[in-house]
Image (cartoon, grey):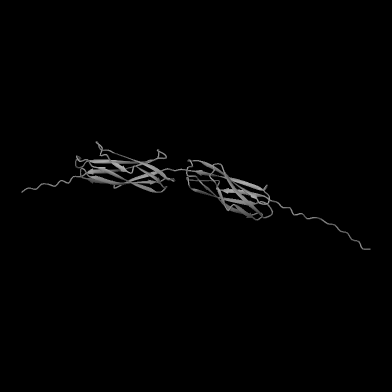
Amino acid sequence: VQVSAENSCTATAIVVRGVEVSVSPPENSGAPENILTYKVTVKNMGNIADNYNLAASDDKGWIPRLTPSSLEVPPGENRTTTLLVTIPRNAAHSTRDNVTVTATSQRDNKVKDNASCIAHAVIDRRVEVSISPSYDNGVPGATLSYTVTVANRGNVADNYDLTVSDSAVPSWNPTVSPTFLLRIAAGGSGTATLSVTIPSDAGHGEEDNIRVVATSRENVGVSATASCEAEVWILVRPEVSI
């Protein structure tokens, strides 16, 4: 007699999908028109390879972008993409934009995760003024010329108004031309000409201290000053008689 028996079972493959997103650094800052860069990490938390669509959104409408905007990630591993945020030219100082990056599975749009970061606009306005030469002299009626250099030491382009004054009484009426410098780039500089006409009745050795002030049009609290000297020099030739 042949005795036999049999049984069976079913093996079911369970597909698990999951994703985790992180952004580094959590906050970045820069001047208007600068591009801020972040590293976005997408980790596949499932047990099967997956493809993820990436999207970026923000609060201020600074139009963040991702490159690349999709990633294929093996199970248990991670891949990275770059988030770029351009700070608008007209962004006000200390404005913060909250940016959110979302990764969504192409196979199951219910599988998604997101992470956020901050884009911070920082405006630093500074200016420096110098005059060359720092001293000059001439005879009465002569016009002395100096070069005024205005350097933008801030992190944004700026516009500057130039004003001039002097110490002589009565004034020698110094002038600066032009009286403004526009769109001086961050780290750049511009020049103007300072002219001082010595009065025709000025005596030998008389001096005038001239001061030039550069003031930001965007923030009048930002200014810098430089000075130079003008002196009357009369060459007296002794008379010789025989």
Which image quarter holds the N terminus? bottom right
User: Horizontal and vertical percent for residue 174?
Assistant: 28, 41
User: Horizontal and vertical percent for residue 85?
Assistant: 53, 47
Name which residue lies at 23% across and 43% down: 231
Please identify the residue farthest to the bottom as the structure is shown. 1
Residue nearest the viewer, comparing 127 with 5: 127
User: Horizontal and vertical percent for residue 29?
Assistant: 50, 45
Please identify the residue farthest to the top as the structure is shown. 170
Name which residue lies at 23% across and 45% down: 137
User: Horizontal and vertical percent for residue 71?
Assistant: 62, 54
User: Could you tell whether 2 is left or right of 229 in the image?
Assistant: right
Name which residue lies at 61% across and 50% down: 54
Picture mark count: 0
Please identify the residue farthest to the left as the structure is shown. 242
User: Could you tell whether 207 is left or right of 118 in the image?
Assistant: left
Residue nearest the viewer, comparing 12 with 52: 52
